[in-house]
Amino acid sequence: MATGDHYFTPRPGGDAGLRPLRVRLAGRDVELTTAAGIFSPDRVDAGTRVLLSHAPEVPSDGDLLDLGCGWGAIALTLAMEAPHATVWAVDVNERALDVVRRNAASLGLNNLNAVPPEDVPADVAFRAIWSNPPIRVGKAELHALLARWLPRLDDDSDAWLVVQRNLGSDSLQRWLEDELPAGFSVRRATSSKGYRVLNVRRAHGSRVSRS
């Protein structure tokens, strides 16, 4: 990764350094591709492992979102576990999106779209959002990110966010409770290994319009 770059840099500098990564996702041992300049390039990071271990069953259909997808641990899991759903893997990092596309192709997943934020159609409402959000972008940018995407939950639908306790999970929960519009509820679903899993739910009938 070039000096000054972060995993949330749109175009990381330096050599991508594509290399194999063997991990277990959705109950399968899979051989994937990873690269330099993306989030947690050498493993499924601890927070994502907590989320994958504690989130509920994936909705079987509809549109599902992995927000801040990195190399795709969450998005690939969603796509494998819900082959009839449409999975959106969203990241600002173009190299990460390229890696997700490579990984989806290698697994034969044709229900996964790895795209930058602006390429998600505005009329899509999500049956589920799973995310290990990019805490290190800073509080203002993180809040703007969540304020943009969480209101796109469909009725009777849930977001599952994993946040390290020492990086502000409890203050983020309070902010979500204060800032999300009527019809949303926020709770701490579980705590494990220094991480909180927060559940954001949109109640039935709280979407004003689907257009």
Image: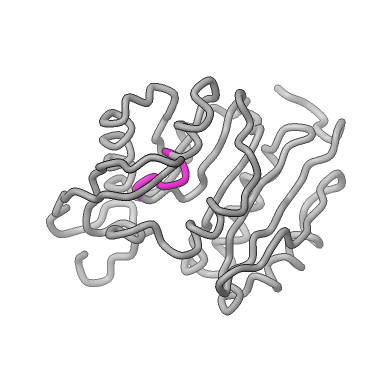
Point out the stretch of residues depicted in magenta.
Answer: 71-76
At 70% from the left and 73% from the top, the residue drawn is 171
> x and y percent of residue 40 in the render?
34, 61
Left or right of 13 on screen, residue 89: right
Q: Where is residue 164 shown, x and y percent of the image?
A: 56, 71
Judged left or right of residue 95, residue 53 is right
Task: Name which residue lies at 27% across and 71% down.
Answer: 4
The C terminus lies in which quarter of the figure?
top right
Residue 49 appears at what percent x and percent y?
A: 48, 57
**74 falls in the magenta region:** yes
The quadrant holding residue 198 is: bottom right
Question: Is residue 174 or residue 163 the one in the foreground?
Answer: 163
The quadrant of the picture occupied by the N terminus is bottom left
Q: Specify whether residue 178 is painted magenta.
A: no
**By what rule are the colours in the image chosen?**
one colour
Image vertical order of residue 135 relative to residue 54, above or below: below
Query: Which residue lies at the image location 82% right of the left edge and 51% below the top edge?
Result: 185
Residue 68 x/y as whole percent: 46, 50
Q: Main secondary structure of the magenta part?
A: helix
Residue drawn at (55%, 24%) of the image: 85
